[in-house]
Image: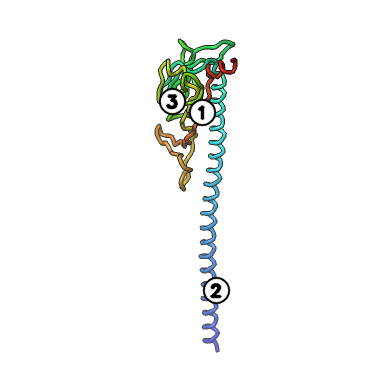
Amino acid sequence: MRPLNRAKEAFQSGFSLLEVLLSLALASAILLAASHLLQVLIQRASWWQLLSQMVVTRQAVVRSIANLGGQVCQAGILQGEKSQWRWHLQQSGSCQIYDMRLQTSHQQLQKRRLGGRYTTFIDSISALEVTYGVSAEDDCVVRQWLAQVDHSQGQQTVMLRLKFAVGIQGQAPEYSLPVGWYVDKSNGQEKLWQPTEVVLSLPCNNSISSSME
C-alpha cells in the first residue's frame, strides 16, 4: 500500500506545482496587460493636457491679433509683404505708423513705431504668410488677394489674411497627429505646431464716404 500512497502523493504534489506555475503565468499576463493599459492612459492624459494647452495658446494668439486689428485707425495699409507690413495704429491717443514683422529665428511676431525699435508682440508663432485683400477704387469689396502690395494698392487693401502656426513645447503621441499639425525638433526641443488662419477687416474710405452721402 505504501508505494501506492507515495505515488498518489507525488502526483498530488506535481499537480499543485502545475497550478502554481499556471497561476504565476496568469498573474504575469494580467500585470503586463495592466502595465500596458496604464501606459496608454498616461499617454492619453498627457496628450489631452497638450491639447488643452494648445487651445488656450491658440485662443490667446488669435485674440491678440484681433485686438491689434481693432486698433487700426486709417483705411488700408502703407505697404505689405509676405511676413511684414506697415499700417496705422491707435496708440497713446494718436494715430501712428507701425511696422509688423515675423522674427523667424525667435519665432515671434514683433511690432515697432516708425523710427523705434522692435518689441515682441506674440511668442511661439512661425510660418507667417500674409495676403492682402484689395478692392476696386469705387467699393470696399475684395476683388483680388495679393502676396504683396505697394502704397497705391495698400490704400485699397480692405482685408488682411494671416496664415501661421501656433506652437507649444511637448512630445507628440505615438499615434498620428491631427490633420495639419506637425512636429519641429530643431534647437534641441520638440515642439508641436497647429496651422491657424485669421482674417482682419480694415477701415475703408469708400464705405465711410458712401455712408455720409
Residue at disc 3, secondary structure: helix
Q: Which residue appears farthest toward the bottom when viewing the image?
A: 1
Residue 7 place in picture, x, y as percent? 52, 83
Q: Residue at x 41, y 36 (%)?
A: 185
Question: Which badge, 1 or 3, comes first in the chain's sequence?
Answer: 3
Amino acid type of the residue tagged 3 in the rendering: His
Q: Which residue is mark 3?
A: 106
Which image quadrant: the C terminus? top right
Residue at disc 2, secondary structure: helix
Q: Disc 2 and disc 1: Cα gap in Å?
A: 75 Å
Q: Which residue is mark 1?
A: 199
Residue 1 place in picture, x, y as percent? 55, 89
Q: Which residue is mark 2?
A: 16
Q: Residue at x 42, y 30 (%)?
A: 127
Indicate which label's residue lies in the foreground, 2 or 1: 1
Residue 102 place in picture, x, y as percent? 44, 24
Label 2 with label 3: CB-CB less than 8 Å: no
